[in-house]
């Protein structure tokens, strides 16, 4: 019989990861085609995320439940992630940026987990290395030496997202926490808008990409992720996110008419094997160990 909790966590994690991949595609389309500048994209993205989340929250105001309003630390991490991500892609290519971003996310979450005293099981270490190897194999042909500013910004973005994810693991009310996290970015967003207003450039298409990115793939996607985090430990959450570039690549094949390659197929299998090893490996290893005792 299928464990209902595991099934729920798996489905929610899958939806969140697809949203992250879609968000990445939207950001690349908007910024790399110069349909909108990095600052305007970030401002519209965060404001639209807050608007959509509070619109949803207003329909649930009559429901009872534990009330929580996020935190300033989570909001600041959300803003740092968003602005660093946008500006990094102005001076770094997609493949290199993806490696730095998700490598930073994974290393941050593993490092914090180790600092908290949690030891990794051998199967978790194996899964981490397998998934990361598959991820590197996918983007290796497109890797070029990054600019120093691009490297620093993308690494900072990954660290901020890793910390935001760790903070979210303790959320009691994911929708409300995410909504208030977005709302609390308003002071940072306002300051950014004032500082970059004179350089703002955008098209209707760029604004639409930013609105979708903020309201749907960020706002709703991050809420789903906060819910999914209840059933994941830090290591599982970090490794699962390595599947985002693979999902984004598959999305490119489906929606941007990019070609399906053997490298993509092989990389997908390797990453999924690594993720499966992390998520299920420790559970079965411990069962085997207990049977031999």
Image: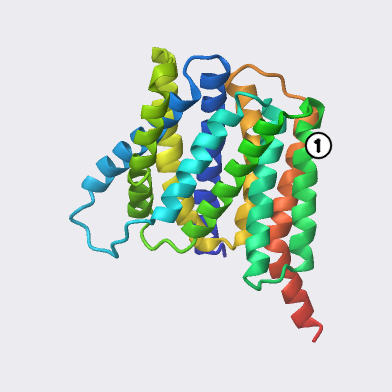
Residue at the limit of the structure toward the left, as seen here: 62
Question: Disc 1 on helix, strand or loop?
Answer: helix
| Drawn side of residue 141 relative to residue 64, left or right | right
Measured along the vertical axis of the image, is residue 103 above or below residue 206?
below
Measured along the vertical axis of the image, is residue 14 above or below residue 47?
below
Can residue 82 be seen here? The reply is yes
Please tell me which residue is depicted at 74% across the width and 51% down the height of the picture.
274
| Crowding at mark 1 (Cα within 10 Å: few <14, some 14-19, many 20+) | some
Q: Nearer the viewer, residue 76 or 23?
A: 76
Q: Position of residue 83 (x, y in %)?
A: 50, 35
State which quarter of the image contains the C terminus. bottom right
Please tell me which residue is depicted at 75% across the width and 48% down the height of the picture.
131
| Drawn side of residue 2 relative to residue 283, left or right | left
Q: Position of residue 263 (x, y in %)?
A: 80, 30
Q: Position of residue 137 (x, y in %)?
A: 81, 36
Measured along the vertical axis of the image, is residue 77 above or below residue 288?
above
Please tell me which residue is depicted at 64% across the width and 24% down the height of the picture.
91
Write down the quadrant of residue 172 in the picture: bottom left
Q: Nearer the viewer, residue 46 or 214?
A: 46
State which quarter of the image contains the N terminus. bottom right
Residue highlighted by disc 1? 137
Write down the quadrant of residue 194 in the picture: top left
Can residue 19 be seen here? The reply is no
Q: Nearer the viewer, residue 135 or 281?
A: 135
Please tell me which residue is depicted at 23% across the width and 51% down the height of the picture.
60
| Drawn side of residue 37 relative to residue 118, left or right | left
| Drawn side of residue 175 relative to residue 140, left or right | left
């Amino acid at each position: 019989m299928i464990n209902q909790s595991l099934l729920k966590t798996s489905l929610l994690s899958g939806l969140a990861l697809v949203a992250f991949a879609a968000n990445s595609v939207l950001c690349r389309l908007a910024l790399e085609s110069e349909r909108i500048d990095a600052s305007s994209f970030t401002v519209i993205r965060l404001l639209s995320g807050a608007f959509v989340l509070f619109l949803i929250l207003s329909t649930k105001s009559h429901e009872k439940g534990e009330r929580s309003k996020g935190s300033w630390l989570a909001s600041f991490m959300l803003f740092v992630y968003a602005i660093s991500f946008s500006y990094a892609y102005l001076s770094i290519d997609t493949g290199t940026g993806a490696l730095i971003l998700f490598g930073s996310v994974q290393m941050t979450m593993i490092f914090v987990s180790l600092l908290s005293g949690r030891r990794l099981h051998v199967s978790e270490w194996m899964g981490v290395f397998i998934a990361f190897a598959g991820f590197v194999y996918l983007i290796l042909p497109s890797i070029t030496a990054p600019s120093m500013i691009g490297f620093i910004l993308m690494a900072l973005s990954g660290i901020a997202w890793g910390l935001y994810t760790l903070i979210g693991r303790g959320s009691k009310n994911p929708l409300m926490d995410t909504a208030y996290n977005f709302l609390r970015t308003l002071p940072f967003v306002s300051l950014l808008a004032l500082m970059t207003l004179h350089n703002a450039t955008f098209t209707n298409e760029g604004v639409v990409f930013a609105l979708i990115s903020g309201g749907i793939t960020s706002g709703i996607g991050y809420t789903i992720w906060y819910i999914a985090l209840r059933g994941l430990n830090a290591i599982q959450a970090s490794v699962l996110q390595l599947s985002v570039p693979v999902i984004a690549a598959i999305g490119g094949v489906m929606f941007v008419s990019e070609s399906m390659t053997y490298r993509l197929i092989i990389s997908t299998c390797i990453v999924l094997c690594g993720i499966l090893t992390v998520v299920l490996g420790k559970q079965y290893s411990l069962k085997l160990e207990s049977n031999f005792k």
